[in-house]
């Protein structure tokens, strides 16, 4: 194939791939059934691993004992990972609350102000109280703000509702505790 033809062919292929819409698989619905890899499917990989590469709870077990322990280990790992992801969502919300600008006119806190949040004297600086209130107002009317919509969906899964007075108070308490925890 001549060089120019090959170059044109490659350029056309690259252009076709680059112009194709990305394939994004949406996350499963929250009520989707979770299924775990059965040990029978994992056995070929697990059995060839060096013992020091096996997860600690599965090390030193006989093959039968490992197979019996597998479902509990897999479920435990799943729960730990999901908890870590949920904690990451909470941390993201706190960072957005502290440093975001789209929902408030209040300035961002300085590093010394953030360091003060870890003190457990029960009093939050007025700046943080203002940012929490503005954040809750933003949650009640997120419009096209993707970050506020994300925060609202995470907090709604936890049972918070920024549209009611009681929900706003619960959110205020939760967010006050969270800003103390994260720094």
Image: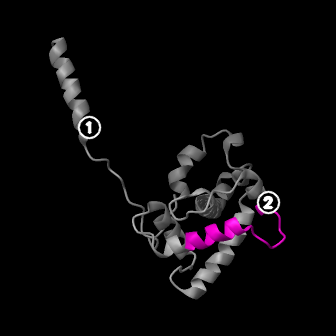
Q: Position of residue 118 (x, y in %)?
A: 79, 62
Q: Position of residue 33 (x, y in %)?
A: 46, 70
11 sits to left or right of 174: left
**Predominant SS of the magenta segment:** helix
Residue numbers of the magenta segment: 116-136
Q: CA distance from mark 2 to mark 1?
A: 51 Å
Disc 1: CA contacts within 10 A as few (<14), some (14-19) or many (>=20): few
SS at mark 2 in the image: helix
- Up the image or down, 92 lies above or below 2; here it is below
Q: Residue at x 40, y 69 (%)?
A: 143
Q: Is residue 140 visible?
A: yes
Name the residue nearer the viewer: 157 or 136.
136
Give the vertical position of 18 relative to 3 (above or below): below
Query: Toward the viewer: 149 or 71?
Result: 149
Q: Secondary structure at mark 1?
A: helix
From this view, report whether residue 179 is shown above or below residue 45: below
**Residue occupying the point 74% across, 63% down:** 181
* Label disc, if present, on residue 17 of the rendered structure: 1
- Residue positioned 74% across, 49% down in the render: 60
Q: Disc 2 or 1, which lies upstream in sequence?
A: 1
Residue corresponding to mark 2: 116
For the C terminus, which image quadrant? bottom right
- The residue nearer to you, when weighing 130 against 148, is 130
Instruction: Tell me the number on the disc at residue 182.
Output: none
In the rendering, at what x and y percent does residue 165 appear?
Answer: 57, 87
Viewer-side label of 2, 1: 2
């Amino acid at each position: 194939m001549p060089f120019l033809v090959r170059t044109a062919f490659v350029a056309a292929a690259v252009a076709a791939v680059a112009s194709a819409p990305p394939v994004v698989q949406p996350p499963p619905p929250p009520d989707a059934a979770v299924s775990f890899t059965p040990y029978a499917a994992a056995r070929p990989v697990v059995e060839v691993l060096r013992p020091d590469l096996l997860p600690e709870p599965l090390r030193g077990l006989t093959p039968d004992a490992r197979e019996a322990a597998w479902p509990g280990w897999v479920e435990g790992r799943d729960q730990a990972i999901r908890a870590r992801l949920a904690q990451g969502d909470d941390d993201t919300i706190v960072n957005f609350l502290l440093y975001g600008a789209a929902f408030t006119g209040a300035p961002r806190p300085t590093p010394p102000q953030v360091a003060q949040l870890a003190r457990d004297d029960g009093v939050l600086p007025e700046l943080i109280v203002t940012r929490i209130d503005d954040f809750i107002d933003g949650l009640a009317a997120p419009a096209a703000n993707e970050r506020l919509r994300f925060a609202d969906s995470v907090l709604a899964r936890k049972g918070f509702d920024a549209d009611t007075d009681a929900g706003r108070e619960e959110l205020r308490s939760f967010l006050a505790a969270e800003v103390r925890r994260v720094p």
